[in-house]
Image (cartoon, helix red, strand yellow):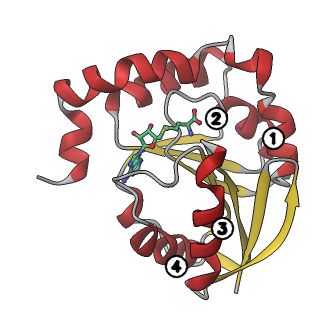
Amino acid sequence: MKIEEWGKSKILNLIFKPAGFLMGNQIRSLFMNPEKMLQNAELDASQTVLEIGCGPGFFTIPAATIVGKNGKLIAMDVSTGFLEAVEKKVKKANLKNVDIMQKDALNTGLSENSIDKVILFGVIPFPLLPLDKLLPEVYRILKPKGTMSVWLFPPLITYWVLKVIPQTNLFDLLNKNGSIYNYIRK
Ligand SMILES: C[S@@+](CC[C@H](N)C(=O)[O-])C[C@H]1O[C@@H](n2cnc3c(N)ncnc32)[C@H](O)[C@@H]1O
């Protein structure tokens, strides 16, 4: 079964529901500041940004606000349940610059060299997002010198992921701002 079909299934959305409640809850912003994290990811006005694994949209609304009306935020996830929650938030915030995509991030269907920045916040490592397939796809869609910003949760796996990314020979580490690692496409 294709992963997009999985993402539509009632069972998967039921399993994801409790996690979605925790990830999308406003209480989260008491100990995690999404705007600050996005600043550390060097998000900027007018950029075209792909948020992979947006979940229920904790980072989506602040990210779309930062890129502004001349930019675009593509919120991608497989779970239709999460994407419905994102759609409600986008409507409530009256944002016109968000594209919501139910798609497998390993095969985004986006054009090559079309994205300024990819955000991977709290999504790697994830069983459905193996780095050996995900990173080449991110590389493909990023513009030359496009960037990828990574926030790792739980931080315990940091060591392993930080070792694997340079091994692909696709990205160079630009900097680390707070808890965000910013990479540039080679
Ligand atoms: C731990 S959640 C993080 C959600 C969000 N970034 C946050 O921090 O609130 C991981 C998300 O990745 C999504 N995901 C997993 N595999 C995916 C894939 N292959 N393509 C797109 N999204 C995927 C899941 O549905 C889930 O919403």
Query: If you read the primary sequence from the N terminus, does the residue marked by circle 1 or circle 4 appear first?
Result: 1
* Rendered image: mark on residue 37: 1
From mark 2 to mark 3, how far is it between C-alphas? Answer: 24 Å
Query: If you read the primary sequence from the N terminus, does the residue marked by circle 2 or circle 3 appear first?
Result: 2
From mark 4 to mark 3, how far is it between C-alphas? Answer: 20 Å
Identity of the amino acid at label 4? Arg
Where does the image place residue 84, in percent across and percent down from the top left? 41, 24
Identity of the amino acid at label 1? Met
* Rendered image: mark on residue 162: 3
From mark 1 to mark 2, how far is it between C-alphas? Answer: 12 Å
Q: 10 Å neighbourhood of mark 1: few (<14), some, or many (≥20)?
A: many
Instruction: Tell whether 65 sits left or right of 40.
Output: left
Tag 4 residue: 140
Instruction: Tell whether 70 sits left or right of 158.
Output: right
**Residue at disc 2, secondary structure:** helix
Residue at 60% of width from left, 14% of height from top?
25
Q: Is residue 65 above or below residue 119?
A: above
